[in-house]
Image: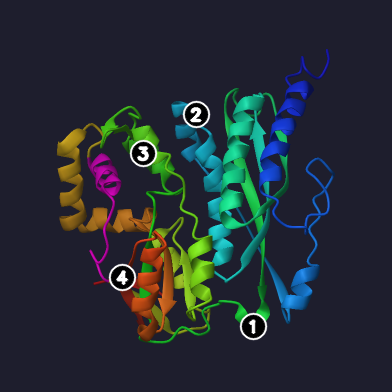
Amino acid sequence: MDYKQAGVDIEEGYRAVTQYREYSAKTIATGAVLNGLGSFAGMYSLKEYFTAMEEPVLVSGTDGVGTKLDIAFQMNKFDTVGIDCVAMCVNDIMCHGARPLFFLDYLACGKLDANVAAEIVKGVAIGCCETGSVLLGGETAEMPGFYEPGKYDIAGFSVGIVDRKKIVDGAKIREGDILVGIASSGPHSNGYSLIRKVLPDMSEDFGGMPMGMVLLEPTRLYTKPILSLMEKIDIHGMAHITGGSFYENIPRMFPGDSSLSAVIREWSWTIPPVFARIAAGCYNAGCSGPIAQKLGSDLLQNDAAMKQQMFSVFNMGIGFVLALAPENTRLAIELLDGMGFPAWEIGHVTTGKRELRFV
């Protein structure tokens, strides 16, 4: 028996790497990269930052895409989940004001299909280009018998940099600061274990599109608007609305020893229709169409338990939150809207224990 008979096709791996190189090359717009894809490790020079910054600090984050991948398998569409992987990592490090430098991915499967793997990495490269990250390297692991044939998993790792004096850590947040929410593009990459249970039919028509395609809309990348905003406005705190949604993530922007809490005004922003459809599925997985949409809207308006669940699991249309001084709020919203990122004043900061409540 040889390696291929054991389930690992080395030649298919070589073919995948050849395609990866093409996508990686498109992300390199800096002379800081010292070697090409395929070495044992990626090398990135920080020389320019040691002259441009007083005290450069590296900021890192890692995450995956989760069970959203199952919908990609069902729809046979793989490029958007690569964008998700980048966004989940880069949006996190943005919360501390870090400019992304480079990204690495880890792709695992049971049986490698170079074309599928390349589509996933193509999405990673798109996300890297959009956020100014270099796709510096990665790993593809073929593990027969461990993953089912046709199934893939992906995780990533982002590294960014910020001058220590410009780190956003919530220390500037004060009572009376305004919370500005920036629109999400849908559920992003959280809550899909529940979504897959309550919306089992990926072919269901939703606004003229199959439900599966709606749910594959990639996580929004907030790097460009946030970096632009930081040049004009002093941002006191930031939160990426991921797993745990509002209740877990917004309080994370406050320092651990603070006596601050967040107050969110219900219905102060536009909630995308897909969340009403999910709420309806949670109540009755057998309903669909306009009836389901109306049911879901009614539940979000009138059912306290359903509302609590939805705002504990899903971003509900807000993917990123800023804490700003009141005098900067209007300008921030205007600038974000002008960059194609709808934003709303969704609440404020008050004193109290480190928590969140709705009014």
Inspect the image, locate mark 4, and give the three-letter code of the amino acid beneath it.
Answer: Ile
Question: Residue at 26% across / 39% down in the picture?
Answer: 281
Q: Is residue 56 magenta?
A: no
Q: Mark 2 points at which residue?
A: 73
Magenta-colored span: 265-283
Residue 25 location (% of width, % of height) = 71, 44
| Cα–Cα span, label 3 and label 1 | 41 Å
Residue placed most toward the observer, 335 or 193: 335
Left or right of 271? Residue 35 is: right
Dot 2 or dot 1, earlier in sequence: 2
Question: Which label sits on residue 346?
Answer: 4
User: Around disc 2, counting alpha carbons within 10 Å, would you say few (fewer than 14), some (14 to 19), or many (20 or more)?
Assistant: few
Q: Name the residue under label 1.
A: 165
User: Around disc 1, counting alpha carbons within 10 Å, would you say few (fewer than 14), some (14 to 19), or many (20 or more)?
Assistant: few
Question: Residue at 31% across / 72% down in the picture?
Answer: 345
**Residue 210 visible in image:** yes
**Residue 142 visible in image:** no
Residue 164 location (% of width, % of height) = 67, 79
Dot 3 or dot 2, earlier in sequence: 2
Evaluate if marks 4 and 1 touch, with contact meaning CB atoms under 8 Å apart: no
Position of residue 324 relative to residue 12, above or below, is: below
SS label for mark 2: helix
Inspect the image, locate mark 1, and give the three-letter code of the amino acid beneath it.
Answer: Lys
Dot 4 or dot 2, earlier in sequence: 2
Tell me the quarter of the picture where residue 159 sits. Answer: bottom right
